[in-house]
Amino acid sequence: MSVATPAADAAIARAASLRDTLAVSFRDEAVRSIYAEATRIADRAAHQAGDRRYDFDQRIDRIVTSPVFGLPLMAALLAVVFWITIVGSNTPGVWLASGLFWIEDQGAALFTALGLPWWATGFVWHGVYKGLAWVISVMLPPMAIFFPLFTMLEDLGYLPRVAFNLDFLFRRAGAHGKQALTMAMGFGCNAAGVIATRVIDSPRERLIAILTNNFVPCNGRYPTLIMLATIFVAAQFPPALASAAAAGAVMAVVALGVVFTLAVSWALSRTVLRGEASAFTLELPPYRRPGVLRILYTSLIDRTLFVLWRACLTAAPAGAVIWILGNISAGGATLDQHIAGFLQPFGHLLGLDGVILLAYIIAIPANEIVVPTMLMVYMGTGQMTDVTSFEDLRRLLVDGHGWTMLTAVNLMLFALLHNPCGTTILTIYKETLSAKWAAVSALLPLALGFLVTFFVAAIWRLFL
Amino acid sequence: MTAHNCDTCVVHAELERMGLSLDRFDRVVALAGNPNTGKSTLFNALTGLRQHTGNWPGKTVTRAEGGFEFNTVRYKLVDLPGTYSLLSASHDEEIARDFLLFGRPDATIVVADATALERNLNLVLQVLEITDRVVVAVNLLDEARRKGIDVDLRSLSRDLGVPAVGLVARTGEGLHGLLEAIDGVTSGAVATTPLRVTGTPEFQHAVSELVPLIEEAVPGVPNARWIAIRLLDGDAQVEEALRSGRLADVVESQTQGPGRFSRKIALAGAQ
């Protein structure tokens, strides 16, 4: 585009010679005079009436950022957020599912009454529409609860305290303390977390933050975790403890994600991205009362609907693909059975199955559609058409498709450790402008996911 | 939205929030300031948009643009990431710096935190070094009141040589005064005499000698003065940008709007 000009070189050379005519510390003088001027003006304009410096904020901070209570308090807060999400999304999810699938039946009946061919009914209602219905009923309730709660903590001013509490861990891992902030953004959306790494000024530490952002589960992955925690983990406990156990299981996965974030950051900063952690300053802003109505509005209308819309955009074509795969037969079996059958041995090795792996392949554009895809493929085989409660789901998975506790545990692990979604990979490419790092960011977690699930499956089968 | 007071009623009479309709605008106004001083909250209050806000420094990492109309003049408002200084290194702070230097805004609003005025004034003074058309918006007056801090805006305005207005962006208090100041400064009705921390005569001489050389190297570059100071300082990054021609590209890119992609991500949660 632009060409270097001799004029540029001339200006640089002149600057160098002029520099010699100035006192050595001329720029320090300039900076110092700016500071002096700022002090003078501020002293004249701002007056402190009385001494109220030891205010309420600092007393709270002494507990929230204390070396003893800081981390446990943080874990407890997050667990409460998950618990509310799980308890709150249980019933509405079932209502949504029964309502939306009732519409499916009515729509299909209408098509048949109109005399449309069976494949048109199937493609539109049992394919495209069903995909959408699943995504909405699985995604909407947890998101509509989690987003506002998380934004509430953010508005209150809690995130910088999180960064403060985790700083010593990231520093020991050779990473930047602000990575705690970008990690926290990853809980909402990993693509957003990757963009948030712009606050990190060292390129090395920024790259570490980008490559490890995917190790915390995003909103698209909570529904998977919540569903599995509810129907497998919680079922092992008496009803009174069930939702707490489910929240605990989700918390354990998240904690594992943080451990992986730190471990991989540590490994990267000692191998390919070698270097020391840099120092930085982080302001702890005052606690501010969250604007509850504004938060509800922005997190429900802007974020929830936006993310749901994105999920729907991928769910509709995915639903179509699954319907086609499930309705074209070759050699006595449908196409999805062929593919799942082909993936089955590898899936079994990882403690999963072929259908789960197929779902993860179809869900590369957006993680939100993993569970819907999986269920649609399972139910396409016909022995069950209606799932209206978690108990139905459990029966479908355990009795119908041979799931065990191992399948559930390993799927939760795999939901945490696998390639980022298409949007995130694209964002990583745009932020790093490097196909190499984008590829590493996709393959590194996937390889870890294979490894971890493989070993868990092997050990499980050996001892249990 | 939360409680309105009479201050905002007046605003409603004359301020029209234009959201994303930016196809036709008369003046460009940039929003600068230290991190977490409420720039995005002010941006939302003026444009009616819902740029994601949050109570932590570093929330905004991209440039967001929105529109508003005041006294029949249409403005494009550019929300920038927070920055402590124009000499900063991280990518988000570069975005802010590049727009302030090369985006040719008709006015720059520097949002300052009333509870930490001294620290915030460092950036104000740096911005005054590069442009005359500045409005200082002293935000978070409510928190300052709670802490027992009283800010004398007249004294501040007199010392800085540019309008200084008090603000509570969250409730809309003081918006009207800010809008009038923006109107006055962008139209030229309010003449500013910004305080400049000038340095020694030798330094001034060196700068004025370099400016024409830089303008020859990068024709049409705004703020050649700032580049001259950086060159005198021996800033390797600026030298490289000038030599490789990247500086011209940066200048040119400032007049183009931000990508749609970043706006989508903004709503999804990045900022």
Image (cartoon, coloured by chain):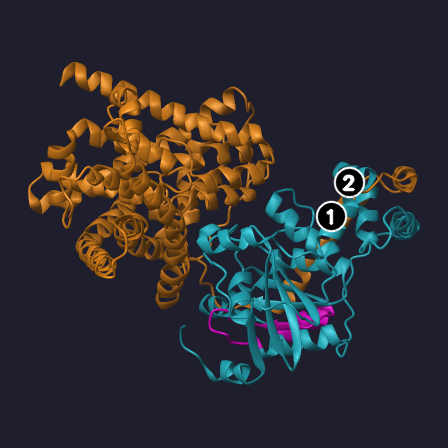
Chain colours: A orange, B cyan
Chain on which label 1 sits: B
Task: Please check the rendered image and state whether residue A258 is part of the magenta-colored stretch, yes or no.
Answer: no
Mark 1 = which residue?
A: B250
Residue type at mark 1 is Val
Mark 2 = which residue?
A: B241
Q: Which residues are magenta?
A: B153-175
| Residue A127 numbered mark, or none | none
Q: Tell me whether marks 1 and 2 sit on the same chain.
A: yes
Query: How far separated are the C-alphas under marks 1 and 2?
Result: 9 Å
Looking at the image, residue A133 sits to the left or right of residue A172; the answer is left
- Please name whichever residue, A156 or B69, is drawn nearer the observer in this view of the structure: B69
The tag earlier along the polypeptide, 1 or 2, is: 2
* Residue at 19 percent of width and 56 percent of height: A105
Residue type at mark 2 is Ala
- Please name whichever residue, A244 or A75, is drawn nearer the observer in this view of the structure: A244
For disc 1, the neighbor class at 10 Å (few under 14, some 14 to 19, many from 20) is: some
- x, y (%) of residue A464? 13, 19
Residue A298 occupies which quadrant of the picture?
bottom left
For disc 2, the neighbor class at 10 Å (few under 14, some 14 to 19, many from 20) is: some
Secondary structure under the numbered disc 1 in the rendered image = helix
Q: Quadrant of the N terminus of chain B?
A: bottom left
Task: Please check the rendered image and state whether residue B164 is part of the magenta-colored stretch, yes or no.
Answer: yes
- x, y (%) of residue A43? 63, 64
- x, y (%) of residue B227? 80, 48
- Please name whichever residue, A70 or A323, is drawn nearer the observer in this view of the structure: A323
